[in-house]
Image (cartoon, rainbow, N blue to C red):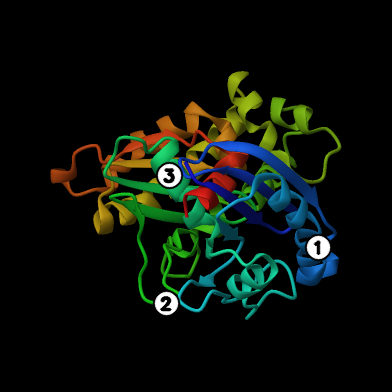
């Protein structure tokens, strides 16, 4: 089984793994950098780490998942919304010049979608859709083991689907930041609520307390979850009508809400679907967590 390098390039978190063509990871280097340093600082650190890993494991090729739109035909970064110094950068050629190895690149959502389809929640399905709900919302579709691509740089930008005619997007309502904001607004008048007490004096990342508040029956948490699952069900009805995947897997920080998130979407989704689709695709939690992008990079 061939040995490969898988690279995840994000805003702050970067991972370089050594693994096999089946997605198995055998070695890992993980590091964070100051986003203010931009792309050059991240590239400098990658260039420092690669020689040791290559000398130790003798990999045959490299796959890389980048946190933003990429032009896979040219091997370049189309645009970077989070970190400066990446837009237009020839990532594939740079990695090849650095290592003399063949390189494949994808955006991180597509890379994670491939991993979940082949090694995670989508195993055994012909068509699998993946949705990541973190600081932003992204997605990817895998059919017969291959990432679906539209026209360049056409990706499955589910986070930019409109939820109304005013231009409100899925990301506006269902990203981690959006849910944090909704929670902050909701607890202003309910400082004695369970959710407010769990949050305390924290000023960010409020969504991570949603699961615990739900377990304790907090009505504010239930109301916020109902809003999120309703919006996600509407968004995923468009995905279903266009692609009709057999399974939809949910990843990212918001997926840590767990089964209540899946159940809420599954309950609301049929109301947005044409009757012949029945209950629609299976709704599952993603299985690979923070390994999704590096595993997908190995599979590229």
Q: Which disc number belongs to residue 230?
A: 3
For the residues carrying marks 1 and 3, which lies nearer the camera in this image?
Answer: 1
Query: What is the distance, in whole Å, between disc 2 and disc 1 at their CAs?
Result: 27 Å
Q: Which disc number belongs to residue 35?
A: 1
Q: Which disc number belongs to residue 224?
A: none
Front one among 55 and 156: 55
Query: What is the distance, in whole Å, between disc 2 and disc 3 at their CAs?
Result: 31 Å
Reading the image, the residue beneath label 2 is: 152
Choose the circle earlier in sequence order: 1 or 3: 1
Q: Quadrant of residue 60?
A: bottom right
Q: Quadrant of residue 79?
A: bottom right
Choose the circle earlier in sequence order: 2 or 3: 2
x%, y% of residue 247? 33, 40
Q: Quadrant of residue 295?
A: top right
Whether pointer 2 and pointer 1 mark residues with C-beta atoms closer than 8 Å, the reply is no
**In the figure, 30 relative to 73: above or below?**
above
């Amino acid at each position: 089984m061939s040995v490969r390098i898988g690279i995840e390039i994000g805003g702050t978190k970067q991972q370089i793994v050594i693994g096999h063509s089946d997605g198995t990871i055998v070695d890992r280097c993980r590091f964070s950098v100051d986003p203010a340093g931009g792309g050059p600082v991240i590239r400098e650190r990658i260039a420092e780490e690669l020689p040791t890993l290559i000398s130790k494991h003798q990999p045959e090729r490299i796959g890389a998942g980048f946190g933003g739109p990429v032009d896979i035909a040219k091997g370049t970064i189309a645009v970077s919304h989070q970190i400066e110094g990446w837009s237009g950068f020839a990532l594939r050629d740079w990695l090849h010049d650095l290592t003399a190895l063949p390189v494949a690149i994808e955006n991180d959502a597509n890379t994670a979608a491939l991993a979940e389809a082949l090694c995670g929640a989508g195993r055994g399905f012909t068509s699998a859709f993946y949705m990541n709900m973190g600081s932003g919302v992204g997605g990817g579709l895998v059919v017969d083991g291959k990432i679906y691509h539209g026209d360049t740089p056409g990706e499955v930008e589910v986070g930019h689907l409109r939820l109304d005619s005013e231009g409100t997007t899925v990301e506006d309502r269902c990203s981690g930041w959006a849910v944090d904001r909704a929670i902050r607004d909701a607890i202003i008048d309910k400082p004695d609520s369970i959710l407010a007490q769990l949050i305390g004096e924290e000023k960010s990342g409020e969504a991570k307390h949603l699961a615990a508040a739900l377990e304790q029956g907090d009505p504010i948490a239930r109301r916020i979850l109902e809003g999120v699952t309703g919006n996600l069900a509407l968004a995923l009805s468009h995905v279903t009508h266009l692609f009709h995947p057999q399974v939809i897997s949910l990843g990212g920080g918001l997926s840590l809400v767990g089964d209540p998130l899946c159940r809420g979407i599954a309950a609301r989704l049929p109301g947005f679907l044409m009757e012949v689709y029945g209950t629609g695709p299976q709704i599952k939690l993603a299985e690979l967590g923070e390994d999704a992008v590096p595993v997908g990079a190995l599979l590229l």
